[in-house]
Image (cartoon, coloured by chain):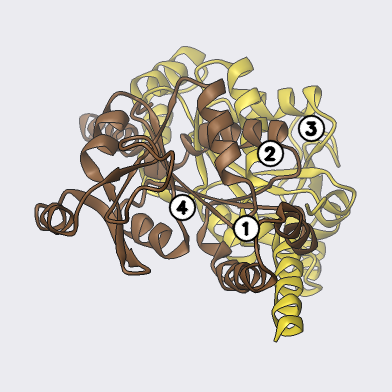
Chain colours: A brown, B yellow
Amino acid sequence: MEGKGILIVLSGFSGAGKGTLVKELLKRYDDYALSVSMTTRAPREGERDGVEYFFTDRKSFEDTIKNNGLIEYAPYCGNYYGTPKAYVEEQMAAGKNVILEIELQGALKIKEKFPESLLIFVTPPSAGELKRRLTQRGTESSEAIAGRLARAAEESEGIEAYDYIVVNDSIDRCVEEIHMLVNASRRAPVRNEAFIDEIRKQLQSFVKGAE
Amino acid sequence: MEGKGILIVLSGFSGAGKGTLVKELLKRYDDYALSVSMTTRAPREGERDGVEYFFTDRKSFEDTIKNNGLIEYAPYCGNYYGTPKAYVEEQMAAGKNVILEIELQGALKIKEKFPESLLIFVTPPSAGELKRRLTQRGTESSEAIAGRLARAAEESEGIEAYDYIVVNDSIDRCVEEIHMLVNASRRAPVRNEAFIDEIRKQLQSFVKGAE
């Protein structure tokens, strides 16, 4: 069937382990690429341009918007964040499944624009486990943790918009499951339109030929 | 997540090889059961009651309808055909994935009544291959084959209603693919409502607790 790569949107509660899952997926399989976001915020220590983000200024970002160069974008805390279109399209044309790690609102925009995109939501085994993971990090104030949990409560309202929900109870198992789900999604009719059209046309031609 | 079996509707063009796929799936994996239809038509030679069909008379069939004992039913060529509810429910409660081999209209009814059912459409690699398989059987008149192809052309219009489309190019590969798709479908939000509800409730309780 169609050999093009799949656009994968990976969302999930902060603390669900999305970053680790993506890293592991890229390490294990050749057929994935991670989309790098563009942002106007300043790089933090250790962040490299083109790796963590494409860093740019407000003017260039707005020019990119005007030139229709972003798949989606949103302002957040006074800065812009967006997904450059060219890289995603190149990778998909080369057969790679491109992963976007974005939150609910962005995911919904992507699904609207690209119905053939695949939306996966990652969650820990329970809310209690999420709280435990956030607390155990020991790097955040209890206010910050409460904020993340409040945000998680909001995001949980959107889970039904996703194609699949994945429980991250073990990185190893979960990576294999995501890979399996990506393969399964290749069999959805929305990703086989050319094949379906062709079979319809052929069948119609047989029916006409028999008349 | 939820351990209950999945209701699988398997449809596909006549000649796509559904029967062989189902037999092979039942042979390879313990977690499937085939739903046996009830019919008012007379048994053909070699057909056994409770194996190919549950054979019954018109009066009993209509009583079963009245008692809400069928998941779906339809008249066809002067006889009734339907899916007894009790067997399906028992098997699913026991964790089995129950396979219904029915056509498009029945499949749509099932999906409407049971949104968590899984609809899989089986197709040969091409319409040409379908024609070749039907012709090669050598058991049917060219009118009968033309009728089957016309029916296939109609059914092809409904493929988008299915969750997955599977190409039967090799029985072995195709059986494994169907099994993979059934496992993948366990991760759809619609089949994890209890889990999602629970995580929402817990998150809400954390938010309220922090206020």
Residue A77's place in the image compared with A191, above or below, is below
Evaluate whether label 4 is on the same chain as label 3: yes
Q: Nearer the N terminus, badge 4 or badge 3?
A: 3
Looking at the picture, which amino acid does disc 1 mark?
Pro
Residue A33's place in the image compared with A18, above or below, is above
What residue did someone put label 2 on? B183
Q: Residue at x 81, y 47 (%)?
A: B54
Q: Which mark is residue B189?
A: 1
Q: Residue at x 52, y 47 (%)?
A: B163
Looking at the picture, which amino acid does disc 4 mark?
Ala
Distance from disc 1 to disc 2, alpha carbons, whole Å, reads: 13 Å
**A54 with respect to A51 (left or right):** left
What residue did someone put label 4 on? B161
Evaluate whether label 4 is on the same chain as label 2: yes
Residue A179 lies, in percent from the top left, at 57, 32
**B208 with respect to B10 (left or right):** right
Looking at the picture, which amino acid does disc 3 mark?
Glu
Q: Quadrant of residue A195?
A: top left
Evaluate whether label 2 is on the same chain as label 3: yes
**Disc 3 secondary structure class:** loop
Foreground mark, 4 or 2, reads 2
Distance from disc 3 to disc 1, alpha carbons, whole Å, reads: 40 Å
Q: Nearer the viewer, residue A137 or B98?
A: A137
Q: Nearer the viewer, residue B186 or A86?
A: A86
